[in-house]
Amino acid sequence: MLSIEQRIAEEIGVRENQVRAAVGLLDEGSTVPFIARYRKEVTGSLDDAQLRTLEERLRYLRELDERRAAILESIRGQGKLDDELQAQILAADSKARLEDIYLPYKPKRRTRAMIAREAGLEPLADALLADPSLDPPTAALEYVSKERGVADAAAALEGARFILVERFAEEADLIGELREQMWERGRLTSRVREGKEEAGAKFSDYFDYAEPFTRLPSHRILAAFRGEKEEILDLIMEPEIVDDPVAAMAAGPNWFERRIATYFNVSEQGRPGDKWLLDTVRWAWRTRILVHLGIDLRSRLWQQAEDEAVRVFATNLRDLLLAAPAGTRPTMGLDPGLRTGVKVAVVDGTGKVVATDTVYPHPPARRWDESLEKLARLAVAFNVDLIAIGNGTASRETDKLAGELVKLLPDQGMTKVVVSEAGASVYSASAYASQELPGLDVSLRGAVSIARRLQDPLAELVKIDPKSIGVGQYQHDLAEAKLSRSLDAVVEDCVNGVGVDVNTASAPLLTRVSGIGGTLAQSIVNHRDQNGPFRSRSALKEVARLGPKAFEQCAGFLRIPNGDDPLDASAVHPESYPVVRRIIESTGSDLRTLIGNTAVLRTLAPTEFVDDTFGLPTVTDILKELEKPGRDPRPAFKTAVFAEGVEKLDDLTPGMLLEGVVTNVAAFGAFVDVGVHQDGLVHVSAMSRTFVRDPRDVAKPGDIVRVKVLEVDAARKRISLTLRVDDEATADAAAPAQRGRGGQRGPGGAREGGPGSARDGGPGGARDGGAGGRNRGPGGRPGGPGGPGTGRRDGAGSAGAGSAGAGARRDGAGARDSAGGSAAGGSAAGGSAAGGSAAGGRERGAGDRGAGDRGAGDRGGAGGRGRDGGRDAAARGGRDGGRDGARGGSGRDGAGRDGAGRDGAGRDGRGRDAGRDGGRGRDGRDAGRDGGRDGGRRDGGRGPRPGSIQNDAMADALRRAGLLDGDGGGRR
């Protein structure tokens, strides 16, 4: 029998002495990160992945040996252990094989076979099996005994059958063979339970489902088992793939029954005992062996799926923990909410909380301007560089608020980023959060966590139980101990791979450092608080209970920037400092000159500094570290930009190209946040033009990707995306829900909304353009006649009353925003400047976007962005006839983003505000502002809608408060 070290060496493809050395270090208390980094000479440079596999297999094989010893003792105690059986047990290489051998000897409840043996029927069973020429009923008469409870020959045969069935079912070699054959030949079948179709709609893919065991992916296994657990599905382990199982059973013995018969020399040769023996074989298969193997394969499927799910979770967690840090920059954290408000926390570059507040920009309070002013004051007062927005409820609305803040303070140079808030609520209610932020309300702690996780995701996320971060698949179905062990290993590897600043690290972060536990981490923090920052690594030895072994394990992973010794800020272990001294002597320079001097360091030969203590791998690592001491292995910080106007599921349409952030990766694909409060799925088949074995080869959590919308299932809240942006979208399946009453589809898939309350439109009540609603006519996206009224962002009309022309979605008669109208002075070119017809479709009207898209009043008059016929004549006309009007008083969109209103006639037919900013047309500011105030009150006088910020008035208020310079820029 191979030793544990030999088996592991074969499995991971290394030498036995490497495994033996690593096992010795692990048994001495060394951690995997320490061994991988600082004991390469001892282990032959085993990396952390190999060491983790070695550690896991070592645990399994040691458990196997413990079970083997217990089984040997049990059988020996029964007096049934012989040399052959002992050899079988010692040779067993898996727990399943070991249990197969032990099954006949395993203590169990009194079975019918035991009762039959007690009645003296085992000789009958042996005789019938050995000599099928015997007539069973005749042979059984000899064993009839009223005293033993055998009433007649039939009872005797029944007892003999029980004995043989048990014998067949407990033959270890046969059962092992049948198990593997069933795995190769069989399949999992699932059916919906009667009456559960509606309640189990989320499992509809498994209502009538079958797939071979060998081809079942882990996520389908977990989904099917969960459906069974929730009493929606019935699962069947079919031993063979047959079209009609009932007919197959009636046809005669199957492969498995024939194999059992062959194994025990049972066959149909016309002898008196053949039929009885074949019936016994069939009975053994159907009542004992199939049931037992079904349970085994269930366990095997679950184990396989669980292993993969744990691996996926661990990989995703690693990617999340090693996400790019924004760095030590003042950050404002916004924890979004509607009724409860947006919680605000500002932290300085070190993560210290310097200000908190709660604002209420969203319904029902709608105090948008007040909220923006509060945020502006905080941003200027604390010189905020970054705005971190949680991705929960009201995230997109809060993102819009942050966008307004960035525009309001352009000189501040702020960047807004939407970050995952997974686990923030868990942290807020934790005992550590109470200790770390004792005077802060629980509701505000989440905002602090959101801000800090943008600065340094690793340092903040280690404060949260990894299972609460939520980047796994079916994580609540997995074994708690197994998942925790795997995730803890990932966190340990990540923390030690990056390194920790011992003078700023929290206790939870220090706890994850090699050799440091929770108690020792708190001792380090207490010592730091009482005595000030550590000036050198050697000072760590003064910490209570930090002994030589702990110092050896942790010192190389703890950093002390700006300390007494520059090497203390690097990954060079203190035990290797003598090597560095020899390097300095050989170069004739000092340490500070040598560090980072790539030209000099690359001329050195590592072999010159090798000795009996430090081998070539260690010296090579030292030279690399001296080139870039304390380098952070994490990627550079960058952000995604969500599309404007795409804020909820209904805003998505097939064919949209969007930017998003990968939030989770599973075996079947990647989930991407595109800013609509529901992650979309890029199925593995839509991730690349080539075959993708592992989705993580293409995308990782935190990656910024560009995707196309393929399909939207609003009922099940599912979004289908693709990374192959030239894939065709499925329009009909993905169409958004209807709005208002009517909302029927017209020709060509158009949405022709009937009358009803509209999101933004005029009296006709459609989302964007008049009575006709979206009005997608045949052939083109917009187009088709629209009724009177105003579309979203359509500036037609004066002071909030106007027409979208022959409107379509965001298109005044084919134009993107509006045609005609005047407000605050300045003509919007009437929709026909320079001959650009406003009746064109977005892409197919009058010169393919010419005189249509963005035409007639949208910055460039009629047809300002025509591709063919529009870009020349119509665009020139737009410049002459449109810009003078659109910019000279009417603003951005027709009669102006600021003049006649952002949404033209507005939500209730009166104008959303009749001027987002009260009229920011360059020359028509006063008139536009008056028009906005008079004509743009929502519902006739409730004041500006959130989003319609009086920027000039607010800037004046901030300037008077001393928070803005004279030109409107934020003071820095």
Image: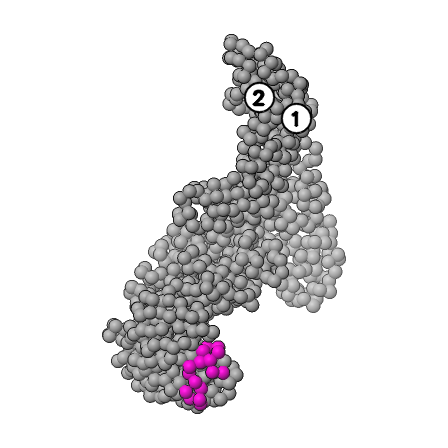
Q: Position of residue 703 (x, y in %)?
A: 53, 62
Three-letter amino acid code of the residue under disc 2: Arg
Three-letter amino acid code of the residue under disc 1: Glu
Taking the image as shown, residue 148 lies to the left or right of residue 932, namely right
> Image point 61% across, 40% down: which residue?
185
> Image point 33% across, 80% down: which residue?
803
Taking the image as shown, residue 842 lies to the left or right of residue 624, namely left
Res. 268 mark: 1
Q: Position of residue 846 (x, y in %)?
A: 47, 83
> Image point 49% across, 46% down: which residue?
208
Front-most of residues 438 and 696: 696
Mark 2 surroundings: few (<14), some (14-19) or many (≥20) residues within 10 A: many
Asked if one can make out residue 354 in the rendered structure from this viewpoint, the answer is: no
Name of the residue lying farthest toward the left = 941
Residue 485 sits above or below residue 627 on the image:
above
**Which residue in the structure is indicated by mark 2?**
161
Place residue 422 in its image quadrant.
bottom left
> Image point 25% across, 72% down: which residue?
939
Front-most of residues 575 and 308: 308
What secondary structure predominates along the stretch shown in magenta?
Answer: loop
Residue 232 sits above or below residue 796 on the image:
above
Q: Of tags 1 and 2, which is closer to the observer?
A: 1
Front-most of residues 859 and 240: 240
Q: CA distance from mark 1 to mark 2?
A: 18 Å
Q: Quick one: SS at disc 2?
A: helix
Looking at the rendering, the stretch of residues picked out in magenta corresponds to 832-847
Q: Which image quarter holds the N terminus?
A: top right
Q: Position of residue 811 (x, y in %)?
A: 41, 77
Is tag 1's residue or tag 2's residue first in the polypeptide sequence?
A: 2
Q: Which image quarter holds the C terminus?
A: bottom left
Front-most of residues 628 and 609: 628
